[in-house]
Image: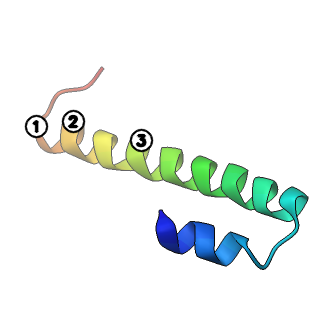
């Protein structure tokens, strides 16, 4: 998290906010993919 904050220091608040929103979306998508893989590997489908 500190690394992200450091990178954000060189950005405008608007660009930093947009970047955080995109990162949040990417992390959520990755988490869903991993959870799906876990369920699939255990043959548990929701």
Tell me the CA gap for discs 3 and 2: 10 Å
For label 2, the residue is 39
For label 1, the residue is 42
Instruction: Residue lying at the far left in this picture: please name it.
Output: 42
Q: Nearer the viewer, mark 3 or mark 2?
A: 3
Answer few, some or many: residues within 10 Å of disc 2's Cα (few below 14, many 20 plus, some between 14 and 19): few
The residue under the point 21% across, 36% down is 39
Query: In the rendered view of the protein, which quadrant contains the C terminus?
Result: top left
Instruction: Look at the image and name its color scheme.
Output: rainbow
Do tag 1 and tag 2 residues touch (Cβ < 8 Å)?
Answer: yes
Q: Nearer the viewer, residue 28 or 41?
A: 28
Seen in the picture, residue 18 relative to 3 is either above or below; the reply is: above
Looking at the picture, how far across and down is residue 2, in whole percent?
Answer: 49, 68
For label 3, the residue is 32
The residue under the point 25% across, 25% down is 45
For the residue labelled by badge 3, is the local secondary structure a helix, a strand or a loop? helix
Looking at the picture, how far across and down is residue 41, in whole percent?
Answer: 14, 45
For the residue labelled by badge 2, is the local secondary structure a helix, a strand or a loop? helix
């Amino acid at each position: 998290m500190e690394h992200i904050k450091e990178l954000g220091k060189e950005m405008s608040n608007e660009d930093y906010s947009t970047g955080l929103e995109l990162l949040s979306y990417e992390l959520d998508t990755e988490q869903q993919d991993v959870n799906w893989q876990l369920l699939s590997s255990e043959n548990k489908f929701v």
